[in-house]
């Protein structure tokens, strides 16, 4: 009888502990979490951003209309960026491109003539969007445009993270930007933001969105943005020597 009571007591205690853990996770204050994340990334001296994009569409039964892009962005506070970009459109091979932004100055690496000082508002905007303030705006935009589903926990490489999950539906997508054949699609997807529980720095944001009108018209878009090398003293971004071809 005593053994049964002891066992029941252990089971009840275990249930209460597990229940309390999940209760704590379910009552995470989103605004406080994001405020801490914003403060943490503002304090970062440097970091790297890797952006990966891939889409694959079937339009009028024609497959393999796919595009992909990868950007690797190094940032040093307050306003230095170095970007390497690879684009692939359809069957075309990857096209490499590189540029540097220091303050208001923009430099591009021309394969034939080397580094040149030019101007490009769009590429400056790309850099600004990946500054600490830009990343905060990205996260705020996700919260505004998508439906937040949950805040849970996950462990990766021995580190614990908050995982904010969103659901993506038709109301979250600008359908006017889609091919006409997909504008009346059923749209479903998820988006996740991972934030380090120890220092509140973001690890990644990722999304997968599917479009389906019928078997002749459908597609998928995958996006992954990862953040790494925070405060790495090996990150260097200097003004390039004009005419040099060294990236």
Image (tube, grey):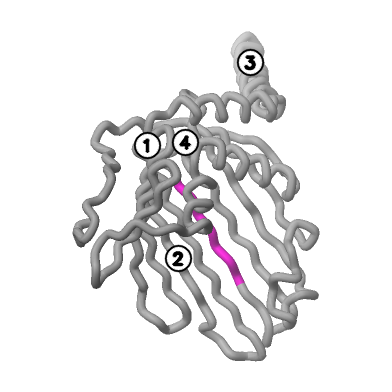
Residue farthest to the bottom, as pictured? 61
Residue drawn at x 75%, y 59% is 169
Left/right placement of residue 106 relative to residue 204 reads: left
Give how far apart the Cα atoms at labels 3 and 4 are. Answer: 25 Å
Left/right placement of residue 43 relative to residue 229 reads: right
Per the image, label 1 sits on a secondary structure element best described as: strand
Residue tagged 3 = 13
Span highlighted in magenta in the image: 220-226
> Within 10 Å of the Cα at label 1, are there few (<14), some (14-19), or many (20+) other Cα atoms?
many
CB-based contact (under 8 Å), mark 4 and mark 2: no
Residue tagged 1 = 76
Give how far apart the Cα atoms at labels 1 and 2 are. Answer: 23 Å
Q: Earlier in the sequence, mark 1 or mark 2?
A: 2
Give how far apart the Cα atoms at labels 1 and 4 are. Answer: 28 Å
Residue drawn at x 71%, y 25% is 27
Residue tagged 4 = 155
CB-based contact (under 8 Å), mark 3 and mark 2: no
Residue drawn at x 25%, y 50% is 240
Q: Earlier in the sequence, mark 1 or mark 4?
A: 1
Tell me the mark number nearer the camera, choosing from 3 and 2: 2
Estimate the x, y position of residue 102 in percent, counting from the top left: 38, 43
Q: Earlier in the sequence, mark 4 or mark 2?
A: 2
Per the image, label 4 sits on a secondary structure element best described as: strand
Residue 223 falls within the magenta-colored stretch: yes
Q: Is residue 34 above or below residue 13?
A: below
- The residue closer to the viewer here, 38 or 108, is 108
Give how far apart the Cα atoms at labels 3 and 1 are. Answer: 50 Å
Q: Which quarter of the rendering shows the C terminus?
A: bottom left
Residue tagged 2 = 69
């Amino acid at each position: 009888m005593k053994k049964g009571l002891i066992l029941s007591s252990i089971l009840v205690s275990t249930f209460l502990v597990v229940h309390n853990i999940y209760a704590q996770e379910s009552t995470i204050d989103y605004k406080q979490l994001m405020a801490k994340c914003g403060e943490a990334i503002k304090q970062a001296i440097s970091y790297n951003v890797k952006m990966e994009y891939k889409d694959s569409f079937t339009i009028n039964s024609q497959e393999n209309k796919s595009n992909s892009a990868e950007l690797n962005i190094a940032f040093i506070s307050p306003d230095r960026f170095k970007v390497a970009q690879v684009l692939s459109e359809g069957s075309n091979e990857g096209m490499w491109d590189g540029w540097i932004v220091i303050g208001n100055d923009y430099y591009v690496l021309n394969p034939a003539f080397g580094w040149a000082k030019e101007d490009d508002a769009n590429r400056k905007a790309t850099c600004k969007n990946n500054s600490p303030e830009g990343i905060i705006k990205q996260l705020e935009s996700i919260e505004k445009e998508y439906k937040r589903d949950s805040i849970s926990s996950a462990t990766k490489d021995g580190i614990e993270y908050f995982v904010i999950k969103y659901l993506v539906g038709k109301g979250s997508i600008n359908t006017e930007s889609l091919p006409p054949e997909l504008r009346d699609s059923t749209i479903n997807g998820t988006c996740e933001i991972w934030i380090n529980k120890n220092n509140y720095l973001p690890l990644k944001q990722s999304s997968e969105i599917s479009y389906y009108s019928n078997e002749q018209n459908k597609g998928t878009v995958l996006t992954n943005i990862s953040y790494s090398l925070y405060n790495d003293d090996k990150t260097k971004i200097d003004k390039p020597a004009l005419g040099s071809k060294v990236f």
